[in-house]
Amino acid sequence: MSVLATAAAIGMPSVVQHTTQVLQSALTLATLPLYLPLIGTPFAPLVTDFLADRILHLPPIGPVDDEPLIAALCPLPWDLLKTLVEDTPIPTLGNGISSASAQHVRFELARRVLARRNRKDESVVVTFGSNAAGLRLIHRQADRRSKKKVWKVGE
């Protein structure tokens, strides 16, 4: 990563491109903690695209060993975690998966990540209605001004 940062700083695009490819090939859920310093830099898409792809390919039904993904999502900054969990598309009807099953997968992932983070001011909610239906991660301090009614799903 230091080679990448140096090459970017002194304007060596071919070295940046090669180093990015090397880093992408070495990026796994196990090595992800080493890549967290890239968040907040122009190279953050290396991390965010990798995680979004893992979320996108979660199996919709049945037991799944998603512990490595949950462990990888836990240390992320709140805004990035919220964006990844809420906005990553999960394939639905085109793949024979109902929309409800896809949302259930997203809800379970969010619930397990927030439980592991163990912060009392964070929760996952399901919203209903034509304008804002879907799953939302709520950080109570940041969302306190919201007048919108939200029902929290009990565990």
Image (cartoon, grey):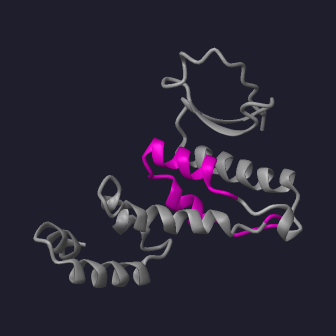
The quadrant the C terminus occupies is top right
Give residue 105's position: percent from left, percent from top: 76, 56
- Of residue 111 and residue 27, the one placed in the foreground of this image is 27
- Of residue 147 and residue 110, the one placed in the foreground of this image is 147
What number of labels is visible?
A: 0
In magenta, the rendered stretch is 60-89
Magenta region includes residue 63: yes
Magenta region includes residue 39: no
In the depicted structure, whether residue 155 falls above or below residue 12: above
Left or right of 37: which side holds 121? right
The quadrant the N terminus occupies is bottom left
Splitting the image into 4 quarters, where does residue 64 fall? bottom right
Give residue 34's position: percent from left, percent from top: 34, 68
Give the residue at x 84% y 67%. Answer: 94
Splitting the image into 4 quarters, where does residue 63 fall? bottom right
Left or right of 61: which side holds 24? left
- Of residue 106 and residue 67, the one placed in the foreground of this image is 106
Give residue 154's position: percent from left, percent from top: 78, 33
In the depicted structure, whether residue 122 falls above or below residue 147: below
In the depicted structure, whether residue 117 falls above or below residue 70: above
Left or right of 123: which side holds 76? left
Give the residue at x 54% y 47%. Answer: 83
Left or right of 139: which side holds 128? right
Give residue 30's position: percent from left, percent from top: 47, 73
Splitting the image into 4 quarters, where does residue 130 fall? top right
Give the residue at x 61% y 50%. Answer: 87
